[in-house]
Image (cartoon, rainbow, N blue to C red):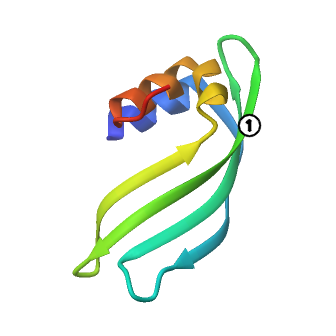
Amino acid sequence: MQELFALVGRSYTFSEFSPKEFRAVADKVFVFVLGRYALTIKRSGRAVASDWVHIFTIAGGKVTAFRAVLDTATAAEAPLLGRWLIWAGFSV
């Protein structure tokens, strides 16, 4: 995971990564976080932005699963981000 974040840092300049809203489902073990990111691809100078939702599953006070939902067409414009989504099990 450390290598992934190092590669992201070398490839993109983030101007925003903002969680905006947090929602918990009282009778379930899910936490939903709504937010937005904006970044510039260092190699091309192209700016990319998307809203996102992160879904955490909590059990025993720990995160046991994580899912991310975002504009995959936008993510595909940022090649490393698209590859990360595929690695994480998403289709782009």
Count the marks. Answer: 1
User: What percent of the width, then of the height, locates residue 83?
Assistant: 44, 23
Q: Does residue 6 show up? A: yes
Taking the image as shown, residue 13 lies to the left or right of residue 24, namely: right
**x%, y% of residue 36?**
70, 51
In the picture, measured across the screen, residue 2 lies left or right of residue 23, that is: left
Percent across and percent down for residue 72 are 58, 31
| Residue at point 41%, 64% (across, down) | 56
Q: Closer to the camera, 35 or 29? A: 29
Task: Determine the residue positioned at 57% across, 65% down.
Answer: 33
For residue 31, above or below residue 6: below
Left or right: where does residue 55 sit relative to residue 71? left
Residue furthest bottom in the image: 26
**Circle 1 Cα neighbour tier, 10 Å, few/some/many (<14 / 14–19 / ≥20):** some
Residue 57: name its quadrant. bottom left
Q: Furthest residue to the front?
A: 27
In front here: 84 or 89? 89
Q: Which residue is mark 1?
A: 49
The x, y position of residue 85, in whole percent, is 44, 32
* Name of the residue lying farthest toward the top: 44
Q: Is residue 17 visible?
A: no
Q: Is residue 56 above or below residue 3?
A: below
**In the displayed image of the protein, which residue is found farthest to the left?**
60
Mark 1 residue element: strand
Give the residue displayed 76% in from the left and 16% down from the top. 45
Type of amino acid at the residue the image marks with label 1? Ala
26 relative to 50, above or below: below
Rendering quarter of residue 7: top left
Quadrant of the image for the N terminus?
top left
Q: Residue at x 64, y 19 (%)?
A: 77
